[in-house]
């Protein structure tokens, strides 16, 4: 089937068919091989992109910039624009659309990403909002594909922790689209939003996958990958106390990895992770609540099962694929 994504925005994976997602993954693998072989790229030559950030970032910003440079494009990082303060979103989008061929947005509201796409006249790529993190999910599935040694449709992914956050939402969507068996293992208070869960469970029934929620840790049984994310996402910094109370039993540690019953199960995390006391936040939480590690133990994070740095690298290849497919010469 012919897939054509030129001019499309990448706001949520819900907008993409399984064939289109498969195309982006195949392109990501190709671009990774090309980079490994040291072949210089020109697929974004003559293209300018702007990276609009309301929230902090290491991987997403660096992936967009290096991906763009690798393929001969130019990138502007913009974290102090007038948008919303002295200039409306609409006017900002119209101006940026005159300067740039594509706009990355990371921020709070999904509506902002959608409105930018509405007015800019060029593709807008979602680099994370409160609701979803679609470029992350592409990298996650690419990593699973590299490690699992079997088709994605035979893989089982268990997401443990805050199952209603942006990362979990996008993972649940991509799994349902591709027929990957997805289990959210979470406390009742942090379940995926009911409407999204229902829609994805229905979609998974069509694609040969399964979308489930379990509150007991045995829910990770048979998993090929155990995934977790921070307990408190950006913008929720006043929630540490309640989240620690809810999520401490769901920490990914060696006992939980053993519950998969699969010694080959890999560990995934979008990063950044709180697995030791080498961060300011980690030390503050330690001082206040006595925890030395949060969502993942240092042991699991550093274990041979952990693929978190491959996953981080794959942000580059997948983001490059999204840009090449939507504005590139490919
Ligand atoms: N995983 C991820 O989005 O990382 P950054 O917040 O560093 O971009
Ligand atoms: N859920 C996290 C993901 C960070 C990449 C957050 O939104 O802060």
Image (spheres, grey):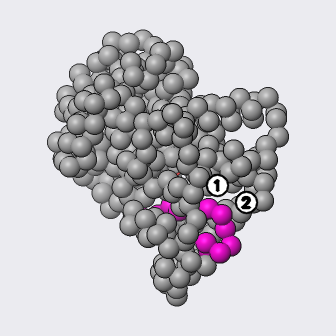
Where is residue 174 drawn, in percent x and y? 40, 38
Q: Is residue 310 magenta?
A: no
Q: Are marks 2 and 1 in contact (CB under 8 Å)?
A: yes
Residue 155, position as x, y percentages in the image: 39, 21
73 w.r.t. 258: above or below: below
For residue 169, above or below residue 83: above
Q: Which residue is mark 1?
A: 327
Q: Point out the stretch of residues depicted in magenta.
A: 96-109
Image spot of residue 147 (x, y percent):
53, 20
Q: In this view of the protein, which residue sits in the foreground, 14 or 138?
A: 14
Mark drawn on residue 202: none
Kindly identify the residue that appears in the image at 32 percent across and 16 percent down.
222
Pointer 1 residue Cβ closer than 8 Å to ligand 1: no
Q: Nearer the viewer, residue 188 or 147?
A: 147
Query: Mark 2: few, some, or many residues within 10 Å (few <14, many ≥20)?
Result: some
- Residue of label 2: 47
Task: Give the side of residue 228 with respect to residue 48, left or right.
Answer: left
Q: Residue at x 19, y 47 (%)?
A: 194
Q: Indicate yes or no whether the magenta region holds residue 103.
A: yes
Q: Please, which residue is most extreme toward the front here? A: 1
Q: Earlier in the sequence, mark 2 or mark 1?
A: 2
- In the picture, measured across the screen, residue 289 lies left or right of residue 191, that is right
234 w.r.t. 97: above or below = above
Near-viewer residue (164 or 253): 164
Whole-percent x, y for residue 173 in the image: 35, 41
Q: Is residue 182 visible?
A: no
Q: Secondary structure at mark 2?
A: loop
Residue at figure coordinates x 79%, y 43% from the top left: 41
Q: Is residue 14 visible?
A: yes
Q: Quadrant of the C terminus?
A: top right
Residue at 63% x, 69% y is 78
């Amino acid at each position: 089937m012919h897939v054509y994504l030129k001019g499309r925005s990448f706001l949520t994976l819900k907008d993409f068919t399984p064939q289109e997602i498969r195309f982006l993954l195949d392109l990501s693998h190709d671009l990774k091989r090309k980079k490994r072989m040291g072949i210089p790229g020109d697929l974004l030559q003559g293209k300018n992109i702007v990276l609009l950030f309301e929230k902090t970032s290491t991987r997403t910003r660096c992936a967009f910039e290096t991906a763009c440079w690798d393929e001969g494009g130019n990138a502007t990082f913009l974290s102090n624009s007038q948008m919303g303060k002295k200039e409306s979103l609409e006017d900002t989008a119209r101006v940026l659309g005159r300067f740039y061929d594509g706009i990355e947005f990371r921020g709070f509201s999904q509506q902002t990403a959608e409105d930018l796409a509405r007015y800019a006249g060029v593709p807008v790529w979602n680099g994370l909002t409160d609701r979803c993190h679609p470029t992350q999910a592409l990298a996650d599935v690419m990593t699973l594909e590299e490690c699992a040694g079997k088709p994605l449709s035979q893989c089982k992914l268990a997401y443990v922790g805050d199952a209603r956050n942006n990362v979990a939402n996008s993972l649940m969507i991509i799994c349902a689209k591709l027929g990957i068996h997805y289990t959210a293992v979470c406390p009742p208070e942090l379940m995926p939003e009911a409407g999204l869960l229902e829609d994805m469970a229905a979609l998974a029934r069509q694609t040969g996958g399964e979308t489930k929620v379990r509150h007991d840790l045995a829910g990770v049984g048979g998993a090929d990958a155990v995934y977790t994310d921070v307990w408190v996402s950006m913008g929720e910094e006043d929630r540490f106390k309640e989240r620690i109370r809810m999520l401490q039993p769901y920490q990914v540690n060696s006992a939980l990895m053993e519950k998969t019953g699969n010694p080959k199960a890999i560990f995934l995390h979008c990063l950044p992770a709180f697995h030791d006391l080498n961060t300011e936040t980690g030390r503050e939480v330690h001082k206040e609540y006595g925890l030395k590690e949060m969502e993942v133990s240092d042991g699991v994070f550093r274990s041979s099962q952990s693929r978190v740095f491959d996953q981080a690298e794959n942000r580059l290849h997948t983001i490059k694929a999204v840009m090449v497919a939507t504005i590139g010469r490919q």
